[in-house]
Image: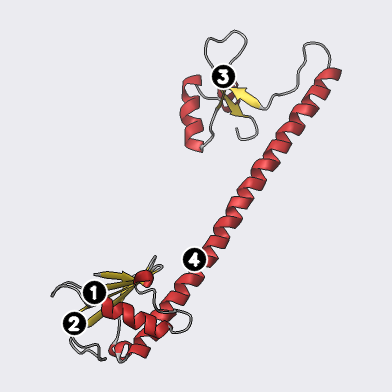
Amino acid sequence: MTVARHALPEYEEEADPLGQFQAEMVQAFKTKAGVPAVWMRGGVSLEVEGHSRLSTAMPQPMAAYQLTVAGGQTVRLAPDEVASWPRLWETVESALTAWTSAVQDRRRVYEAALQAEKDARAALFRARTAVEDTRRELAAVLPPGEAPATLTMSRDDVAEFLGIAPGSVARQMNRWGITPEYERGPHARRPQARYPRALV
C-alpha cells in the first residue's frame, strides 16, 4: 500500500509534521502480509518491509527501511535512523529538505536557460533584421549587377564554399546540426534548402 501526504487530511502538517508522518505510515502498514508498505511525498519515498501490522512501537528489529530520493540511489537506513518515530522522521525530513532544495535550484537553472534561449532568439531576430536592412541600403548604392551577400546559402553555394560535392551538403549540414530553411525561388517548382550563412 502506498500512502501520500494527502491520505490523512485531518492532520495539519505545519502544526504536527511528525504526527502526520506517523499517521501516514500507520496507514501504509495496513497492507497484505509480505507486501512492503510505501510512503511517498514529493520525490522522496520510504519502503518498509517486515514492520508489525499490529504494533507501531519503535524500533522494529525485524523491519527493513529503504529511503529513495528522486535522482539518487536507494539507501537502506541504519538502526540508529529508525530507533524511534522522531528519529525516523528526522531522517526522512532531511531527505525531503535536500530534495526540495535540489528541485528549486534546478528549476532556477532551467528557467534561466529558457530565458537565455528566448533572449538569444530575440537577439537573432534583431540581428537578422539589421542585416536585411543594411543589405538593402548597401544594394541601393552598389553598381548595377553587384549585390551584397544574402543571409542564406543555397546547396550549391555551400558546396562551393566548403569544397565538397553538392550531394554531400545535406549530410554535412545535418552532421553539424545546421537546419536548412526552405525558400521557393522564382523558377523553382518546389522549395529549395537554404542554409544560414553565419552558421556555415
Specify the quadrant of the image occupied by residue 89. Answer: bottom left
- The image shows a total of numbered marks equal to 4
Q: Which residue is mark 2?
A: 53
Q: Which residue is mark 3?
A: 156
Query: From the viewer's perspective, is the residue at label 3 or at label 1 nearer?
Result: 1
Specify the quadrant of the image occupied by residue 33. Answer: bottom left
- Residue type at mark 3 is Asp
Q: Residue furthest right?
A: 141
Q: Which residue is mark 1?
A: 37
Query: From the viewer's perspective, is the residue at label 2 or at label 4 nearer?
Result: 2
First along the sequence among labels 3 and 2 = 2
Question: Label 4, label 3: how many angstroms apart (C-alpha)?
Answer: 49 Å
For the residue labelled by badge 3, is the local secondary structure a helix, a strand or a loop? helix
Task: Give percent across and percent down for residue 49.
Answer: 20, 78
Please indicate whether residue 167 sits to the left or right of residue 88 in the image.
right
Q: Residue furthest left?
A: 33
148 versus 107 height, above or below: above
Please indicate whether residue 88 sits to the left or right of residue 37 in the image.
right
For the residue labelled by badge 2, is the local secondary structure a helix, a strand or a loop? loop
Crowdedness of circle 2 by 10 Å Cα count: few (<14), some, many (20+)?
Answer: some
Question: Label 2, label 4: how many angstroms apart (C-alpha)?
Answer: 34 Å
- Residue type at mark 2 is Arg
- Residue type at mark 1 is Ala
Q: Residue furthest top?
A: 187
Q: Which residue is mark 4?
A: 103
